[in-house]
Amino acid sequence: MEEKLKARPASESCTEQIQILMPEHINGYKRLFGGKLMEWIDVVAAVCARRHAQCNVTTAAVDHLVFQSAAYVNSTIVLKGRVTYVGKTSMEVRVDTFVESLNGEQRRINRAYLIMVALDENDRPTQVPGLICETEEEKAEWEAGKQRREIRRLRYGN
C-alpha cells in the first residue's frame, strides 16, 4: 500500500486516444455527436486516473465541458488527458480534444474537466497518491485546480 501512495509525476498519467470520425459518430446536423465525444472523454479521464491511482476509479462529476467547434466525418480526433489536481480520494482530470489535419496541425474543439474517485477492492473511495507538478504549466493547472475545487465545494457542499 505504501508504494501505491508515493506521489507520482503528472506526466505519468498522460493518455492520448485517436479516433477517425465515422458515420456512426455523427448527429443529425452531420457533426460529431456530443454524447459520443463525452463517452470518449470519460474513457480517457478514467485511464489517466487509473494510471495515477493504480486502482479502479469512477466518474464523480463532469465539472466543465465546453464544445468550442464542430468536427465532421473522416476527421482525425485526438483526445489528450492528464491528472491536474488531487485531493484525498479524488482526482481532477483535464481532457482536451483536437481535430488533427492531414498535415498534423491540431485545432482544439473541446476542453473538459472530470472528477474521478479512486476505489478500493470493495468499491469504496480510497486515498490517492500526491501529484508532482514538474512544469510551470502543471503548477499553474494545480493552482487553478485548487480554485475549481473550492468553487465545487461552495456550489455543491462537497
Image: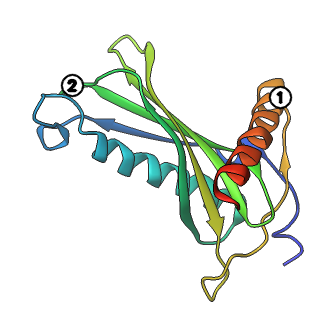
| Residue at position x 77%, y 46% in the image | 150
Instruction: Name the residue rendered at 34%, 42% in the picture.
Output: 37
Percent x, y of residue 48: 60, 52
Q: Quadrant of the C terminus?
A: bottom right
Residue placed most toward the observer, 152 or 31: 152
> Which residue is tagged 1?
135
Q: Which quadrant is the N terminus positioned in?
A: bottom right
Q: Circle 1 — which element?
A: loop
- The image quarter containing residue 105 is top left
- In which quadrant of the rendered view does residue 56 lie? bottom right
User: What residue is shown with label 2?
Assistant: 72
- Residue 71: image location, x then y, percent: 27, 25
**Type of amino acid under label 2:** Tyr
Horizontal side of residue 75 vs 110, given as left or right:
left
Q: Is the residue marked by circle 1 packed among few (<14), some (14-19), or many (20+) residues within 10 Å?
A: few
Residue 59 in picture, x, y percent from top left: 53, 62
Q: Quadrant of residue 133?
A: top right
Count of numbered badges drawn on the protein: 2
Q: What amino acid is at disc 1?
A: Thr
* Mark earlier in primary sequence (1, 2): 2
Marks 1 and 2 sit apart, C-alpha to C-alpha, by 34 Å
For residue 31, the mark is none
Mark 2 is surrounded, within 10 Å at the Cα level, by few (under 14), some (14 to 19) or many (20 or more) other residues, namely many
How did the renderer colour the structure?
Answer: rainbow
User: Along the horizontal axis of the image, is 81 left or right of 37?
Assistant: right
Q: Residue at x 64, y 65 (%)?
A: 117
Which of 40/1 is in front? Answer: 40
- In the displayed structure, 136 sits above or below 46; it is above
